[in-house]
Amino acid sequence: MAQSPRPARGQNCGRLVADGESGNPSMRCLLVVASLLLGSAWSSMAAEVTVHLSDGQGHAVNDAVVMLTTDAAPATAPVPERPVTHIIDQRNETFIPYVQVLRPGDKVVFRNSDTTRHHVYSFAAIRTFEFVLRPGESSPELSMDKTGIAAVGCNIHDHMIAYLFVSAVPATTMSSHGGDAMLSHLAPGHYTAHVWHPQLHPGHPEPIQKVTIASDADVLHLAFTLSLMPDPRMSMDREHLDY
């Protein structure tokens, strides 16, 4: 009886091993199976929390930061994410975006797409800086290594303001133009949902809600009604530049 052809090197475990690789085929198979199981476990951890944010008039609130924190210590330290460089554009004498969420170690570049000069600055405790940017110029990369909030202004155009929100909380996102935010791939446990927006009244209690995720299949819905001050981009709010 003719023997079945043996798989050539590189055909073990569904051809997942490249030609020319050395090593124990059994070990390679075990590693492939383990990676598939880990991927399956990650995809099964699908609990979600959706959040809708509105103001007192029922209008959707965008540019709100939503975080989900837990008191339980993680079993393992989170793997640091690869730093990302974010562009803060200046167009029509407006910072775009208004609010930018960053992770510690992320970088930011300020780009002047206007036809006028801008003097970008911040006095924030987490990072102070200033750049004079002529039309078409961009600032050097600025590393944001500390967590916290930095209000950014323009020393030439007082109505220009933006906020850099640096968070180490893994479950952090922002609300869209429809006022909706979603946090996914959440493990069961007890959490607190926190909301921050640059137009919240100073000194007022932080908007929070307690959240309990009972299983990986949970899909929970939260709603926040926020009392907001007028948009500071309409008239400069220097009080908020001390972040």
Image (tube, grey):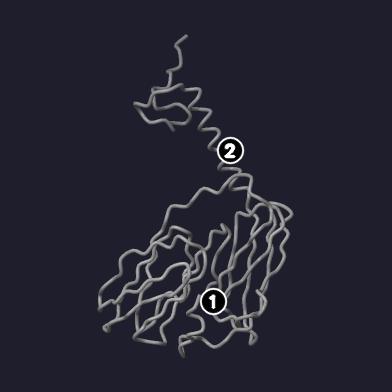
Amino acid residing under circle 2: Leu
The answer to whether residue 220 is left or right of residue 113 is right
**Label 1 CA crowd tier, 10 Å (few <14, some 14–19, many 20+):** many
Identify whether 119 is placed above or below 184: below
Judged from the image, the secondary structure of the residue bearing numbered disc 2 is: helix
Quick one: 228 or 121, which is closer to the camera?
Answer: 121
Amino acid residing under circle 1: Asn
Identify whether 206 is placed above or below 72: below
Q: Which residue is at a point 53% across and 62% down the rendered structure image?
A: 167
The answer to whether residue 109 is left or right of residue 57 is left
* Residue 51: percent from left, percent from top: 63, 69
Residue located beneath label 2 in the image? 37
Identify whether 54 is placed above or below 139: below
Q: Which mark is residue 83?
A: none
Q: Quadrant of residue 221?
A: bottom right
Judged from the image, the secondary structure of the residue bearing numbered disc 1 is: loop
Quick one: 135 or 130, which is closer to the camera?
Answer: 130
Label 2 or label 1, whichever comes before in sequence order: 2
* Residue 11: percent from left, percent from top: 42, 27
Q: Quadrant of residue 9?
A: top left
Distance of label 2 from label 1 (alpha carbons)? 38 Å
* Residue 91: percent from left, percent from top: 34, 80
The answer to whether residue 95 is left or right of residue 137 is right
Q: Which residue is at a point 71% across and 54% down the rendered structure image?
A: 189
**Label 2 CA crowd tier, 10 Å (few <14, some 14–19, many 20+):** few
Q: Which mark is residue 62?
A: 1
Of all residues shown, which one is farthest toward the bottom?
A: 235
Q: Are marks 2 and 1 in contact (CB under 8 Å)?
A: no
Q: Which residue is at a point 52% across and 75% down the rendered structure image?
A: 63
- Which of labels 2 and 1 is toward the front? 1
* Residue 228: percent from left, percent from top: 59, 84
